[in-house]
Amino acid sequence: MTDQIITDAATLMGWRKSSHSGSESGSCVEVLDGYPLGVPVRDSKAPHGPALVFPADGWSSFIGAVKGGQFPA
């Protein structure tokens, strides 16, 4: 569950493509490092759209599950 929603993600600077996104351009999940309230995540196709902010420990658990193959494609 997210703790916060940022309504216009473009107001924050420093977004990067998640290393877990595919290689297709324009179809990426972007994350923002160093945000004090958690890990903001947005859809690169909608930079002015919302970003969901996940607690850092929850995001780390999710990434661990992805790396561990718990979400088969």
Image (tube, rainbow, N blue to C red):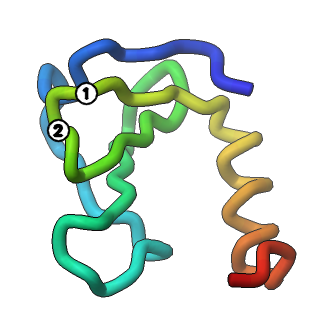
Left or right, 6 with respect to 53, comes to: left
Q: Where is residue 19 drawn, in percent x and y?
A: 42, 75
* Residue that mark 2 sits on: 47
Q: Where is residue 50 drawn, in percent x and y?
A: 34, 24
Name the residue located 74 percent from the left edge and 26 percent from the top edge. Answer: 1
Name the residue located 75 percent from the left edge and 41 percent from the top edge. Answer: 58
Q: Dot 1, how many residues are within 10 Å of its Cα: few (below 14), some (14-19), or many (20+)? A: some
For residue 10, what is the image quadrant? top left
Image vertical order of residue 16 relative to residue 12, above or below? below
Q: Label 2 sits on what residue type?
A: Pro
Q: Where is residue 61 drawn, in percent x and y?
A: 79, 54
Q: Label 1 sits on what residue type?
A: Gly
For residue 70, what is the image quadrant? bottom right
Q: Do the residues labelled 1 and 2 touch (CB within 8 Å)?
A: yes
Name the residue located 38 percent from the left edge and 57 percent from the top edge. Answer: 29
Left or right, 43 with respect to 15, comes to: right
Q: Where is residue 52 drawn, in percent x and y?
A: 48, 28
* Residue that mark 1 sits on: 49
